[in-house]
Image: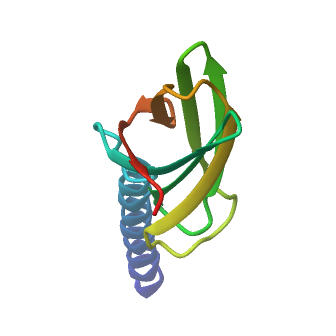
């Protein structure tokens, strides 16, 4: 009788722990990457010898995410693509502000667009101090 009761208690504990794990996994997947509902991105800008230099900062969900930065120019348009790539394994769950830099050849009056994980960002370009 005691053995059956012990088995029931262990099964209930297992089910409760499994439920907690599932809930936290779902919550983590919903917040794994920052929301980019027209997230603002301020870029400092320098133009020299036909090249634009942009510096900016984005919010990543953890310090273990890698930030991939790519830029392309077509005509009078510069597109900056940012991608947050999660690291495999365990990582501290704190938001991380990550700086980035990109240099690209384009006409002086180029229009800049940017995306984070494919979602458009609201870009403000300011001259570097």
Residue 28 position, x and y percent, is 42, 57
Q: Nearer the viewer, residue 102 or 20?
A: 102
Quarter of the image that includes the N terminus: bottom left
Left or right for 65, reference 38:
right
Q: Residue furthest left?
A: 37
Q: Residue furthest top?
A: 75
Residue 118 position, x and y percent, is 50, 30
**Figure check: 27 above or below 52:** below
Left or right for 124, reference 59:
left
Quadrant in the rendering for residue 78 = top right
Residue drawn where x is 38% and y is 53% of the image = 31
**Figure check: 74 above or below 53:** above
Colour scheme shown: rainbow
Left or right for 23, reference 116:
left
Q: Residue furthest bottom?
A: 2
Residue drawn where x is 39% and y is 61% of the image = 24
Residue 84 position, x and y percent, is 57, 48
Residue 110 position, x and y percent, is 51, 25
Count numbered badges in the picture.
0
Q: Nearer the viewer, residue 24 or 53?
A: 53
Quarter of the image that includes the C terminus: bottom left
Residue drawn where x is 44% and y is 73% of the image = 94
Residue drawn where x is 36% and y is 68% of the image = 16
Quadrant in the rendering for residue 111 = top left
Q: Nearer the viewer, residue 86 or 1?
A: 86
Q: Nearer the viewer, residue 21 or 11?
A: 21
């Amino acid at each position: 009788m005691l053995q059956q009761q012990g088995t029931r208690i262990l099964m209930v504990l297992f089910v409760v722990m499994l439920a907690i794990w599932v809930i936290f996994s779902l919550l983590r997947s919903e917040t794994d990457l920052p929301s980019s509902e027209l997230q603002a991105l301020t870029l400092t800008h320098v133009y020299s010898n036909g090249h634009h230099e942009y510096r900016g900062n984005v919010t990543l969900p953890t310090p273990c995410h890698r930030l991939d930065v790519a830029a392309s120019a077509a005509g009078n348009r510069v597109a900056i693509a940012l991608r947050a790539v999660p690291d495999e394994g365990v990582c501290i769950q704190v938001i991380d502000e990550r700086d980035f830099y990109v240099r690209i050849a384009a006409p002086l009056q180029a229009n800049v667009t940017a995306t984070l994980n494919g979602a458009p960002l609201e870009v403000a370009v300011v001259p570097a101090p």
